Amino acid sequence: MESTENELNHETNLSHDRVYYGDTSEVNPVGYADYNEYSQNKEKKQSMKGFDEKYSDFVDYILKITHNIWEEKGIGVIYDTYHSNVVMHTGTINIHGINEVVSGTLQTLHAFPDRRLLGENVVWSGNDQEGFYSSHRIASKATNLGDSSFGPSTGKKAFFRTIVDCFVHSNRIIEEWLVRDNLYIVQQLDLDPVAVAKQLAEKTKNKKASLQTRFGVNETMEGQYMPTAYIPKHDEFEIGDFILELYNHIWERRLFNKVKDFYMDHSTVHYICDKDLIGTQQIQGMLVSLFASFPNAKFIVERVTCNELSDEKWDVAVRWRMMGLHEGIGYFGEPSGNHVEIPGISHLKVYNQKVVEEWITFDGLDVLRQVHMDSEDDHFHSEESE
């Protein structure tokens, strides 16, 4: 599992160590296609050695298995399309093995039996020799008719987004990164997010080993060194350069004044909890509020996947991670001083060398869970006093 990213490294331009490209002409892209029409497309343009014949290309594979498993309730499709030793990263918690995937799917469908997963886009790269990589953005509608980890069933409807990144080889998902907007689900169920987060924190604490689980503090500065500025590798616009420079300036170095250099003045950012931010000033306000909670946190871009739609038009997926102390008053309330880790995935549409639309997804409920965890010292002291 550990070599997953390296196995795909041959695709990247040697000037980038985290940027990968997929040739849109090899697949039938999602675009604005309805699944009713998309599923009828039988044209095969991509080599899919090792995959079931019913999949015309890699995008088709991702959309069809999602529909088969979730909406058709074909749970057993998991046995055909997941590796027995699959690793699934859900927020900051890892799930190991195909049986856990089956269990989690059944429990989610028990809680939301009428869930509809609308595939908004699949950004991809790779091939059938070294493996494929996908970033699948999903809009879901569901009714909470069964009990869940959030609490008893409420009968209320919910809309939420999920982005799932997968590494796939020979018809099987080897590794998966799942990011869901659980905070918005809890809000729509009329539950208290902080109360739910505290319940989840208590369950996590009970499962946690009584050994060290944290190793130092992640900070944006390396000792007394300032965050390094990214230097573009190309003289002209190149999408990988553009994305790495955007995240370096704005997210790593907190240069929120640079938002206007990378976003059009009418850009829309679809943030967690179904909040749409319109224009550069609102985007700056969101960033200030988020980083105010974690002012010195380390921000890392883990992977960038790029698909060219046409000249000057790109779909881009970015998997990222923020790590540090919750030591400021911001989006997540009063500072707790706790270590917090936020895995996230963003999708961007880049037209004419600027971002026109973006989807930022991370699990805000998991952040609250970490914020409301007792410190390790408190946990140890409570054990010693028993």
Image (cartoon, rainbow, N blue to C red):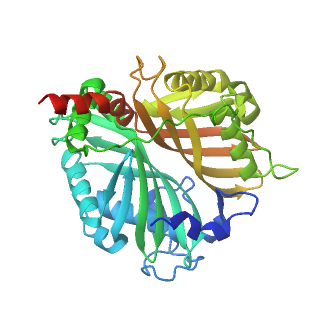
**Residue 224 in which image quadrant:** top right
Task: Specify whether 263 is left or right of 99.
Answer: right
Reply above or below: 113 against 74: above
**How far across and how far down the image is residue 212, in percent?**
34, 43
Reply above or below: 290 against 175: above
Quick one: quadrant of the C terminus? top left
Number of numbered markers: 0
Q: Residue at x 57, y 55 (%)?
A: 31
Task: Specify whether 347 is left or right of 174.
Answer: right
> Who is closer to the viewer here, 145 or 248?
248
Query: Residue extending furthest left?
Result: 386
**How far across and how far down the image is residue 94, in percent?**
35, 53
**How far across and how far down the image is residue 62, in percent?**
45, 64
Q: Residue at x 42, y 75 (%)?
A: 171
Q: Residue at x 61, y 26 (%)?
A: 283
Q: Residue at x 39, y 45 (%)?
A: 91
Task: Specify whether 171 is left or right of 224.
Answer: left
Residue 72 in view (yes/no): no
Query: Residue extending furthest front?
Result: 384
Residue 286 in view (yes/no): yes
**Residue 172 in which image quadrant:** bottom left
Quick one: quadrant of the N terminus? bottom left
> Who is closer to the viewer here, 341 or 214?
214
Reply above or below: 172 against 275: below
Query: Residue extending furthest right?
Result: 235
Reply above or below: 341 against 93: above
**How far across and how far down the image is residue 45, in percent?**
60, 76
